[in-house]
Image (cartoon, rainbow, N blue to C red):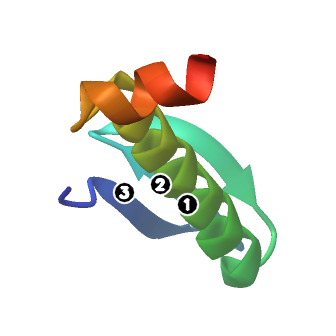
Amino acid sequence: MESTMEIVKWDRYFALYDQGELVCITVYKKGALEVSRRIEELKSLIEEAQRPPQNEETVLNKIQ
Protein backbone atom coordinates (compact mmCIF):
# COMPACT_ATOMS: atom_id res chain seq x y z
CA MET A 1 0.00 0.00 0.00
CA GLU A 2 1.44 3.34 -1.04
CA SER A 3 1.26 6.16 1.46
CA THR A 4 -0.82 9.14 0.36
CA MET A 5 -0.11 11.19 3.46
CA GLU A 6 1.69 14.51 3.16
CA ILE A 7 2.93 16.80 5.93
CA VAL A 8 3.19 20.48 4.99
CA LYS A 9 4.67 23.30 7.08
CA TRP A 10 1.77 25.71 7.61
CA ASP A 11 2.81 28.98 9.25
CA ARG A 12 4.06 27.82 12.71
CA TYR A 13 2.15 24.55 12.46
CA PHE A 14 2.13 21.35 10.44
CA ALA A 15 -0.80 20.30 8.27
CA LEU A 16 -1.41 16.63 7.51
CA TYR A 17 -3.13 15.88 4.21
CA ASP A 18 -4.46 12.55 2.94
CA GLN A 19 -4.98 12.51 -0.84
CA GLY A 20 -5.10 16.30 -0.84
CA GLU A 21 -7.71 16.51 1.93
CA LEU A 22 -6.78 18.21 5.21
CA VAL A 23 -6.83 15.71 8.08
CA CYS A 24 -5.42 17.76 10.95
CA ILE A 25 -3.14 20.58 12.00
CA THR A 26 -0.57 19.96 14.71
CA VAL A 27 1.83 22.16 16.64
CA TYR A 28 4.73 19.73 16.25
CA LYS A 29 5.87 17.73 13.23
CA LYS A 30 6.24 14.73 15.55
CA GLY A 31 2.49 14.94 16.24
CA ALA A 32 1.68 14.97 12.52
CA LEU A 33 3.93 11.94 12.00
CA GLU A 34 2.15 10.06 14.80
CA VAL A 35 -1.32 10.84 13.42
CA SER A 36 -0.13 9.71 9.98
CA ARG A 37 1.28 6.46 11.42
CA ARG A 38 -1.96 5.67 13.23
CA ILE A 39 -4.10 6.34 10.15
CA GLU A 40 -1.85 4.12 8.00
CA GLU A 41 -2.06 1.38 10.65
CA LEU A 42 -5.87 1.55 10.66
CA LYS A 43 -5.96 1.45 6.85
CA SER A 44 -3.83 -1.71 6.83
CA LEU A 45 -6.02 -3.35 9.50
CA ILE A 46 -9.14 -2.60 7.45
CA GLU A 47 -7.51 -4.03 4.31
CA GLU A 48 -6.51 -7.16 6.20
CA ALA A 49 -10.02 -7.63 7.62
CA GLN A 50 -11.58 -7.31 4.17
CA ARG A 51 -9.35 -9.99 2.62
CA PRO A 52 -10.99 -13.41 2.31
CA PRO A 53 -9.43 -16.16 4.45
CA GLN A 54 -6.73 -18.13 2.63
CA ASN A 55 -7.70 -21.54 3.96
CA GLU A 56 -11.41 -22.11 4.62
CA GLU A 57 -10.81 -25.42 6.43
CA THR A 58 -8.74 -23.67 9.09
CA VAL A 59 -11.57 -21.20 9.70
CA LEU A 60 -14.16 -23.98 9.94
CA ASN A 61 -11.99 -25.90 12.42
CA LYS A 62 -11.68 -22.81 14.62
CA ILE A 63 -15.47 -22.39 14.66
CA GLN A 64 -16.13 -26.00 15.72
Q: CA distance from mark 2 to mark 3?
A: 9 Å
Mark 2: few/some/many CA within 10 Å (<14, 14-19, 20+): some
Kind of element beneath mark 1? helix
Q: Return the residue at label 2.
A: 40
Q: Return the residue at label 1.
A: 36
Of the two numbered discs 2 and 3 in the rendering, the one whose residue sits closer to the viewer:
2
Amino acid beneath label 3: Met
Mark 3: few/some/many CA within 10 Å (<14, 14-19, 20+): many
Q: Quadrant of residue 18?
A: top left
Q: Taking 56 as reference, is 23 above or below it? A: below
Q: Where in the figure is residue 56, as x and y percent of width and height?
A: 28, 25
Q: Return the residue at label 3.
A: 5
Kind of element beneath mark 3? strand
Q: Taking 43 as reference, is 52 above or below it? A: above
In the rendered view, does 51 fall on the left or right side of 35? left
Q: 33 or 47, which lies in front?
A: 47
Q: Where in the figure is residue 5, as x and y percent of width and height?
A: 37, 57
In the rendered view, does 22 fall on the left or right side of 25? left
Q: Taking 56 as reference, is 33 above or below it? A: below
Q: Quadrant of residue 64?
A: top right
Q: CA distance from mark 1 to mark 3?
A: 7 Å
Discs 2, 1 touching: Cβ within 8 Å: yes
Discs 2, 3 touching: Cβ within 8 Å: yes
- Judged from this view, the residue extending furthest toward the right is 27
